[in-house]
Amino acid sequence: MAARALFSAPPGLYSISIPPLSSLTSRAHWVLLSHHLHVGPLSSSSSSSRRRCHYRACTDESKGPTSSDSFVLTTPLYYVNAPPHMGSAYTTIAADAIARFQRLLGKKVIFITGTDEHGEKIALAAEANNRSPREHCDTIAQSYRSLWSDLQIEYDKFIRTTDQKHEKVVEDFYARVLDSGDIYRADYEGLYCVNCEEYKDEKELTENKCCPVHLKPCSLRKEDNYFFALSKYQSKMEELLTNNPEFVKPSFRLNEVQSWIKSGLRDFSISRASVEWGIPVPNDTKQTIYVWFDALLGYISALLENGENPDLQTAVSSGWPASLHLIGKDILRFHAVYWPAMLMSAGLGVPKMVFGHGFLTKDGMKMGKSLGNTLEPTDLVNRFGADAVRYFFLREVEFGNDGDYSEERFINIVNAHLANTIGNLLNRTLGLLKKNCESTLPFSSTEAAEGIGFKNTVEKSVEMARHHYENLALSSACESVLDIGNAGNLYIDERAPWSCFKKGGETAEMASKDLVVILEALRIMAVALSPVAPSLCARIYAQLGFTEDQFKSITWADTKWGMLPAGQKTMDPKPVFARFEVKSEEELQEAVSKAVKSSKKASRTQGMVGA
């Protein structure tokens, strides 16, 4: 199809951007109707002067905080068409582990999560539940907050795109992109997926013209919308990926992004004429801003403190650009292509990294309500606890790839690693200390480890764990920490202190040193594994004789050998992680039923309380 420009504007009065013919698809019919951008009459010279001034200001702002001590990371802003699922829980668990690790390093962390609450799908979901869109959003947003609390997610900012401060930031950002000449008005006709809230290329669809993600038919739509001139940023996006190979991770996701860009960037619609539930377009209140153009800006509006002047410049100066966006692979295009181009248009810095993780399956099958095999995170945490859920998904799913859940494997892994390797080692060592040393350390861990090679094994494993955490290899980090526990069990079995104590003299003294050595290794494990299983590690620290405040103040420096002093009194041995038993089908159904009833009761309470 050809593009026809139908406009007339006096020279020098308006800046009009027309999409290049190369950006048009064969199925799209574009007609530039009129600019309607209300940027005001400017002479050529004054326009140029203003643009230079604008970009100079934006360049200064785009730098954000210069301190290397800050670390800003985000989850997606989760769509509130339905309560949280295991996929959103997985992303947030991973983000929380990374945030906790960065805090251990002494970084000033700003961990952002929240909810995306505008769009056609939200309005339809609210109508289906006989609620207003606002009531629906309040209820679902609260369900996210409640689940994050149950999973021990320690976020710093929870942004909702219905917050007033967010709307003001969106308006400011839109004005900047408009001033850059990157917004124009046009007709568009194409196949639209309501669930994805986006137009689809026919080549993306299944044989029946269904969305490949939701497997639902896409409907043909024709709308008069505002568009963002993404094609204008073809070369800049190519340069971004060439100069910053770490921008998209894992590397195979970078290959996907490079392929999209190589195929040619096409302008995309940033408004909807048929959607009422959204932020009005500033220069045309008959339209609302496209949900993705709106939601992505939540990463910036979240940086505003309560009571601050709610504008874009204030938000940017509070922590932008982000260090890390964690997302599912299904929204990679929005974050790694659309978002950086939008930021460039507004004169702002791009995030340092976008990491796209894989999908979760259950028993080797894709999860879905139609298959009856959904995995409800609330039920899972009610049955097994936060530590077990966090550990399993971070240890057993290689971060970046797809991962699978089966209950049998879940129980076997957490029993073997947390109950046996860690819990049993602590319990039997403290038992021997109580029996032979009255629960008091006879030596400091520094004295006890003199001439013992086991200390070197621990130090090497800790260094590897740090390396893996820093590279977002969370599964490998867990494995490195567990290596300490495996080595500790082997060490104590070989040394057999229970037999040595019976012999008395120097042999018994060496046995008491062996106990101190094992307890120091467990203390180090508690620090190194705390990003993944915080409650378990707090219980370990408590049994070793430390206070709650001492645990809360730990840093990665506490993984250094030698923190257990002579004379420290430990607690009586008590299991820090109870084993799970594989239940019969009847017992399992009863447990699920109780969890569902508890969840419904909590949901009713949340609905009354609001967000």
Image: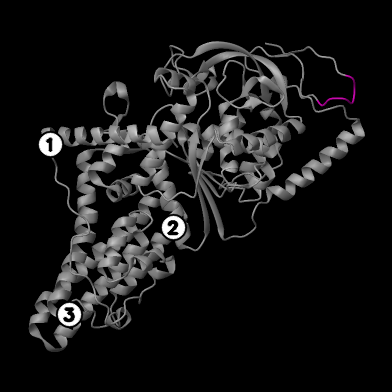
Whether residue 407 is situated above or below residue 523 in the rendered picture: above
Residue drawn at x 59%, y 31% as measured from the top left: 294
Where residue 11 sits, quadrant-wise, is: top right
The residue where tag 2 is placed is 101
Residue carrying label 1: 587
Pointer 3 residue: 511
Report crowding for label 2: few under 14, some 14 to 19, many 20 or more residues within 10 A (C-alpha).
many
Q: Earlier in the sequence, mark 3 or mark 1?
A: 3
Magenta range: 10-15
Q: How far is the residue under mark 2 from the one under mark 1?
A: 38 Å
Residue lying at 30% horizontally and 66% vertically, measured from the top left: 541
Tell me which amino acid carries mark 3: Ala
In this view, 112 is above or below 425: above
Mark 2 to mark 3: distance in Å? 34 Å
348 lies left or right of 483? right
Q: Earlier in the sequence, mark 2 or mark 1?
A: 2
